[in-house]
Image: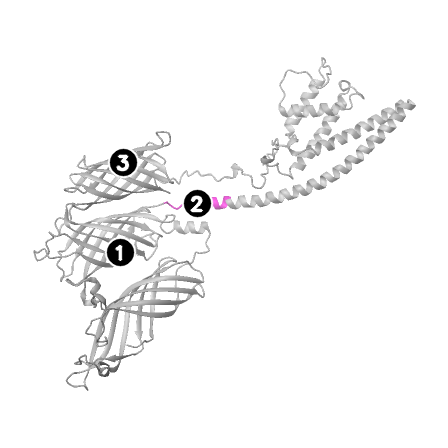
């Protein structure tokens, strides 16, 4: 057949931005071909026996699509699928060439492809794709060259094609530009989990085998486990063991039949209520040598199968749901290898029904905490911006203020020098009145100069106090000054046994230093009015400092400066934090009162171990650890598969007590007690006692434990690793 053009269409369902399932239909535009004669045989001139013809080809099927990147302009993807190909043409009758007979050929096909999307808009996409379609062809096909031979008698044909399509997306939401808060609230209103979650699904199945199959309709018990990558898409691995009596549900197993495999779950809606979903997968039906088929013989053979169906999920909570499904179980015809299947009629369809309980284990989404943290970060960012601005204003203010103070200082120093010169002249002239006037003016100038030095002192040396503290200090000073037995001594104002505060000592030292400069002019003990005036001026200086410091922030602690920050003028002042500093008062409270969950999943463990007792087996299993409130207790559901001369599955629910860091933060022993169903020589239902210890390593826990099941009828020594999240 010649190369040809096809037209058609696709319908896709997107389960998040990365995974899609689509169905397709393609139809050819009259493919030109060379058709062999119906009674023609190969000779040297076989090409002359070929007649021109047209063939009509159509294809339909489904495929999975995995987008390798999210919604960017250039977004590559992979596809894999299967379907049916139909070729229709007319063939002249061998007895009467004028009579044309309608012919039809069907093949099962597989297809893999690589493509890319060009996102023209959010809803319109141009897709370009390279695809390889392969199928097995009947060697009697009238469109097959007579010398067609492949290695190992492989009759598979491979056909490359290039596809282009214009895709229109309907429905759905695009949250690529969503904030963390928006994503957290979206998760809260979908499945309630943050990110990927682990899923355990104990349950049962019933397979109604095809009438042409040798297998007896059979009940199975087992389950599946896997991960949900989002609230819509998940992957599972399953294992089911046949019950001892095919037509009865029991916990006694038939070790001659089991099935295992994997599948993909694609939900059609968010799991906030009754929710339908699709199932696509495959597996292997394993049959023992002693299996007795429906004919009473041992001729049935193990076979692979494909799986596809629909299910329904009924959530009881975020953590537990009931589920049921119906699936088409596709197997090849007896005595036909699956690799040699050519036509749809060689595929036999059985029906499998499933039901069970689904346990979701994952980190619960706390949208409120995300909102609080985001709000706190926004406030901190705003504070950092404001602090940066304050620093800039501070530098600008200090530069201007220091310049003015230096000018004023130079002016008053010059005035004092001039007054000193005038004082010398007055002393020489023995002009007492002029001398006293000059001394008073000089004292006032020195006091102002001293105030400027005090005001311009480093921030770390400033003394700030409330008005009550200041008034109390003034009262104490005046009271001590007026004491009748007061006698002035150099270096101190009063002699009192009452202990001064550090703040008062620093202030008194400052006052003492200032008055020592003028003590030769006028005795302090004889002039309460001057002291009162001095304290009043000091109060004004403190007011100026207070007004100034309200415009500045405290120096950073890394610069070694310290400030005495107290309430001032009756108003509580919040210290300003320099940019880059950490203020513990701005941390968001993590108090979860009223929101504490009773079960908090925080670990998932995988393990392997030796099972011994009435049956020896290699056990491979998984555990979920859900902390019970804020106690050292964990609720631990456990699921495992026992692989030995008899296969089986076990399921238990346990409560474990953790002796956290009992041996110097090295080993963490634990004990547990639970109930479950365990495989053995016969199926056991009973208690489960666990003794073990764990070691913190690589961000998780390496653990070793011993389990005594059903009063030591079955035992297990296991080693595993717990992932903490």
**Residue 502 in the image, given as x and y percentages of width and height:** 62, 24
The coloring applied to the image is one colour
Q: Name the residue at 60% across, 44% down.
A: 388
Q: How crowded is mark 2: few (under 14 residues within 10 Å), some or many (20 or more)?
A: some
Q: Position of residue 484 (x, y in %)?
A: 72, 13
Foreground disc of the pair 2, 3: 3
- The image quadrant that residue 592 belongs to is top left
Image position of 409 with respect to 524: above or below: below
Name the quadrant of the N terminus. bottom left
Residue stretch rendered in magenta on the structure: 363-376
Image mark for residue 368: 2
Task: Tell me the element at label 2.
Answer: helix
Give the numbered dot on residue 311. Answer: 1
- Front of the two marks 1 and 3: 3
The residue at 46%/46% (across/down) is 371
Could you tell me which residue is drawn at 82 percent across and 28 percent down?
Answer: 442
Magenta stretch, main secondary structure, is helix
Is there any visible trace of residue 423 in the rendered image?
A: yes
Q: In this view, does 681 lie above or below 494?
A: below
Please tell me whether mark 1 sits on a helix, a strand or a loop: strand
Q: Residue furthest front?
A: 44
| In-image side of 394 versus 68 (left or right) | right
Q: Does residue 308 appear left or right of residue 535 in this picture?
A: left
- Label 1, residues with CA under 10 Å away: few <14, some 14-19, many ≥20: many
| Whole-number angstrom distance, CA of label 2 to CA of label 1 | 33 Å
Residue 26 part of the magenta segment: no
Residue lying farthest to the top in this orientation:
485
Instruction: Please tell me whether mark 3 sits on a helix, a strand or a loop.
Output: strand
């Amino acid at each position: 057949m010649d190369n040809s053009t096809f037209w058609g269409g696709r319908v896709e369902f997107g389960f998040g931005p990365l995974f899609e399932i689509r169905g397709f239909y393609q139809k050819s535009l009259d493919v030109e071909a060379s058709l062999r004669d119906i009674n023609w045989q190969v000779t040297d001139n076989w090409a002359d026996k070929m007649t021109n013809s047209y063939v009509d080809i159509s294809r339909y099927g489904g495929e999975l699509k995995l987008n390798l990147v999210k919604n960017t302009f250039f977004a590559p993807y992979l596809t894999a699928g299967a379907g049916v190909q139909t070729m229709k043409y007319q063939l002249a009758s061998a007895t009467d060439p004028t009579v044309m007979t309608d012919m039809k050929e069907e093949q099962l096909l597989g297809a893999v492809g690589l493509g890319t999307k060009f996102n023209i808009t959010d809803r319109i996409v141009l897709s370009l794709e390279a695809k390889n379609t392969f199928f097995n062809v009947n060697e009697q096909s009238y469109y097959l060259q007579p010398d067609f031979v492949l290695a190992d008698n492989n009759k598979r044909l491979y056909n490359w094609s290039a596809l282009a399509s214009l895709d229109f997306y309907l429905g759905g939401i695009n949250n690529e530009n969503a904030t963390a808060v928006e994503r957290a609230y979206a998760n809260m209103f979908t499945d309630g989990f943050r990110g990927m979650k682990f899923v355990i699904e104990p349950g049962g199945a019933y397979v109604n085998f095809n009438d042409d199959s040798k297998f007896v309709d059979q009940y199975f018990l087992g389950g599946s486990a896997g991960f949900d990558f989002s609230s819509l898409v998940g992957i599972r691995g399953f294992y089911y063991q046949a019950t001892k009596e095919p037509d009865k549900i029991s916990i006694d197993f038939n070790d001659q039949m089991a099935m295992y495999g994997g599948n993909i779950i694609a939900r059609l809606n968010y799991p906030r209520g009754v929710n339908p979903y699709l199932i696509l997968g495959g597996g292997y039906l394993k049959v023992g040598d002693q299996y007795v088929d429906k004919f009473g013989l041992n001729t049935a053979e193990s076979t692979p199968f494909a799986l596809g169906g629909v299910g329904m999920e009924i959530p009881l909570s975020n953590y537990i749901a009931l589920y049921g499904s119906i699936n088409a179980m596709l197997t090849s015809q007896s005595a036909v290898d699956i690799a040699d299947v050519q036509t749809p009629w060689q595929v036999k369809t059985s029906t499998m029904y499933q039901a069970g309980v689904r346990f979701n284990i994952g980190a619960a989404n706390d949208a409120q905490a995300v909102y609080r943290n985001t709000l706190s970060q926004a406030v901190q960012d705003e504070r950092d911006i404001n602090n940066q601005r304050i620093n800039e204003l501070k530098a600008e203010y200090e530069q201007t203020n220091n310049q003015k103070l230096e000018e004023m200082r130079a002016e008053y120093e010059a005035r004092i020098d001039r007054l000193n010169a005038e004082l010398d002249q007055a002393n020489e002239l023995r002009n007492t009145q002029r001398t006293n006037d000059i001394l008073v003016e000089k004292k006032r100038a020195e006091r102002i100069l001293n105030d400027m030095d005090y005001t311009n002192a480093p921030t770390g040396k400033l003394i700030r106090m409330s008005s009550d503290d200041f008034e109390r200090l003034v009262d104490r000073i005046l009271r001590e000054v007026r004491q009748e037995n007061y006698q002035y001594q150099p270096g101190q104002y009063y002699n009192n046994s009452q202990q001064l505060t550090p703040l008062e000592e620093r202030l008194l030292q400052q006052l003492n230093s200032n008055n020592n400069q003028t003590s030769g002019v006028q005795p302090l003990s004889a002039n309460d009015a001057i002291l009162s005036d001095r304290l009043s001026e000091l109060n004004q200086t403190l007011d100026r400092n207070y007004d100034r410091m309200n415009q500045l922030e405290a120096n950073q602690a890394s610069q070694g400066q310290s400030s005495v920050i107290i309430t001032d003028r009756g108003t509580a002042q919040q210290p300003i934090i320099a940019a880059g500093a950490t203020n513990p008062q701005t941390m968001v409270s993590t108090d979860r009162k009223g929101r504490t969950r009773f079960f908090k999943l925080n670990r998932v463990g995988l393990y392997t171990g030796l099972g011994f007792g009435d049956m020896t087996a290699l056990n491979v299993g998984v555990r979920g650890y859900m902390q019970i409130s804020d106690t050292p207790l964990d609720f631990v559901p456990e699921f495992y598969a026992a692989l030995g001369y008899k296969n089986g599955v076990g399921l238990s629910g346990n409560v474990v007590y953790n002796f956290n860091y009992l041996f110097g933060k090295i080993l963490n022993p634990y004990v547990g007690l639970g109930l479950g169903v365990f495989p053995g020589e016969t199926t056991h239902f009973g208690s489960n006692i666990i003794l073990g210890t764990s070691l913190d390593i690589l961000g998780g826990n390496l653990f070793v434990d011993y389990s005594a099941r059903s009063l030591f009828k079955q035992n297990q020594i296991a080693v595993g690793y717990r992932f903490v999240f």
